[in-house]
Image: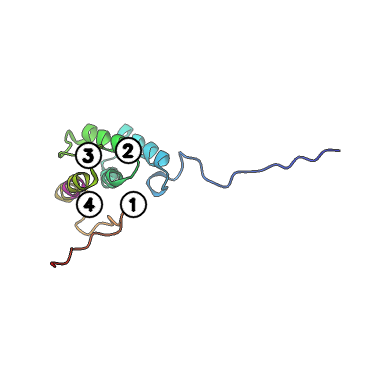
Amino acid sequence: MTMFAVVQACAPSATEGGFSNPAPGARIYAIEDAVKFNRRDQIPKIVECLLSDDELLRYIAIGALQRMTGQDLGYQFDDIEPLRYASYQRWRVWTIEQHLAPPEQAYASTIYPPVRERPNW
């Protein structure tokens, strides 16, 4: 008699968890859902995806922002990191000006630590 073990996966599906799932695939699904249903309240979370190390996620995020807002604010998904970060900051300011995010909104990114001022040396 042969015994077979059944192994169940413990990890959530790549489509589950939305923006709170650190997997780029889950965030891409969340972005597509936000665009499909014009969920403008999700724009700040899409903006956070602009900081991702995953190039495809950044590409999808800026495309979604362009479709939802008609703007790119100079963001290029394949720019070097300092240029992407400067554009990300413009998007943060834009979301605050558009009343999509309060000034102290939890932009506590899961991708980068909170921004601190650099010391003047």
Kind of residue at disc 3: Asp
Observer-nearest residue: 5 or 65?
5
Residue 35, given in percent of the width and then of the height, sits at 30, 34
Residue 21, given in percent of the width and then of the height, sits at 42, 47
Determine which residue is flagged by label 4.
101
Secondary structure of residue under mark 4: loop
> In the rendered view, how is the structure colored?
rainbow
Name the residue: 35% across, 41% down. Answer: 54
Q: Which residues are magenta?
A: 88-92
Q: Could you classify mark 4 by the number of other residues whose Cα lies within 10 Å: few (under 14), some (14-19), or many (20 or more)? A: many
Quick check: marks 3 and 1 in contact, CB under 8 Å? no
Q: Could you classify mark 2 by the number of other residues whose Cα lies within 10 Å: few (under 14), some (14-19), or many (20 or more)? A: some
Residue 25, given in percent of the width and then of the height, sits at 41, 38
Q: Could you classify mark 1 by the number of other residues whose Cα lies within 10 Å: few (under 14), some (14-19), or many (20 or more)? A: few
Determine which residue is flagged by label 1.
111
Cα distance in 3D space between marks 3 and 1: 17 Å
Kind of residue at disc 1: Ile
Q: Quadrant of residue 74?
A: top left
Which tag, 3 or 2, sits closer to the chain's start? 2
Quick check: marks 3 and 2 in contact, CB under 8 Å? no
Predominant SS along the magenta part: helix
Which tag, 1 or 4, sits closer to the chain's start? 4
Between marks 1 and 4 in the image, the one whose residue lies nearer the viewer? 1
Kind of residue at disc 4: Ala
Cα distance in 3D space between marks 1 and 2: 13 Å
